[in-house]
Amino acid sequence: MIVEGSNLIIEKLPKIRTRAVRSWTQFTPRTSPDSPDRGLFGDARGVNWVHDLYLLRQLRQARERRRQAKDCTACRLVKYCGVDCQRAHRKQHKKACKQRAAELKDEQLYSQGRERPEGDFCPICTLPIAFPMCEHSVIEWCCMKRICEGCDMAAEKRGMDDCAFCRTPCPDNDADRLAMIMTRVRKKDPDAIYFLGQECFFGELGLQKDMQKAIELWSEAAELGSIDALFNLGNAYYSGECVEEDVTKAVELYEKAAMHGHIESRDNLGYYEEENGNYDRALKHYLISAKMGFVDSVENIEEMFKAGLATKEQYAEALKGYQDAVEEMKSHDRDEAKRLGY
């Protein structure tokens, strides 16, 4: 059976205990086996005491059943006392379970991933890197750290030709760069595995272009925790490039990445929902990524506002959030690097 409402019995515990103690202290021993109108234990009030012991026993049994019962892993609304119980009662619970599971999923999807991940911050100045990050930062081959253009320029101005983060001499040819990447790949560094997948996908660093190998590397990197790899895999399944097209799987990958703060995945989810006519859901995604500093999402909200699908207040909220995020990405060194065309 489905175990529900066990708390109702547990809530009675203080009353049961109080009444049992009162019955015990008021219990009068039977003085004569022939005494009339006596309960089983010599006093009619002893019947209450026996009944309370019975209730306490029921309470212990209910607690034990509750302890052994398993939550429905999808909705957490009910508990099952076993596999057979779940099979027997699943039909009764299925509709409510699906509805609650969808609600819980949305709660996670829209509440998580509202802050940028650690890899989006320069490890030297600790400021978030502007988008697109590939245009405003450099990857250090030795440690796979992404250094913002401001800190990279400042290091060069001080005469530092080595890695600005770990001080390893920078390689000057593709063979040495690839060797550094492979060293970290062998240590199962998810960022290095992801980056090697990029090189295979585009056929760089002297590697032959191999899209299938890139998919394999991204899959491995995703399992090790790379959200960039999740995003790339989502793109591959969405477009059907090198893999069989599977939009449902692509959306699942985007959702996983978005819940870890991947902005482009969040924006793609907004686009997917908008294309399917789910404008409220699309707007929620766009607002999150806009407030994290993604200009494409601001432009998407602007288009929705012009089409009457978003309110003026929502558009203003997106603009304000975007401007605040952009301000957080600014620094003196970055402004100077931009001025010098670095």
Image (cartoon, grey):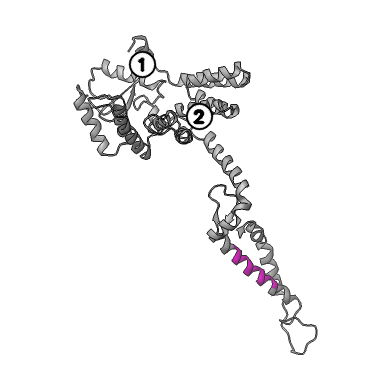
Q: How crowded is mark 1: few (under 14 residues within 10 Å), some or many (20 or more)?
A: some
Please report the residue visible at 58 percent of the width from the left and 55 percent of the height from the top: 79
Please report the residue visible at 19 percent of the width from the left and 26 percent of the height from the top: 175
215 or 294, nearer to the observer: 215
Residue 135 percent coordinates (x, y): 36, 18
Three-letter amino acid code of the residue under disc 2: Leu
Three-letter amino acid code of the residue under disc 1: Asp
Q: What is the distance, in whole Å, between disc 1 and disc 2 at their CAs?
A: 34 Å
Residue 20 percent coordinates (x, y): 68, 70
Name the quadrant containing residue 179.
top left
Does 96 appear above or below 80?
above
Magenta highlight on residue 61: yes
Q: Locate residue 165 relative to residue 228 in the image: left or right.
A: left
Determine the residue located farthest toward the front in the rendered image: 244
Identify the residue position indicated by label 2 in the image.
269
Which segment did they paint magenta?
51-62
Determine the residue located farthest toward the right in the rendered image: 36
Identify the residue position indicated by label 1 in the image.
333
**Mark 2 element type:** helix
171 or 256, nearer to the observer: 256
**Mark 1 element type:** helix
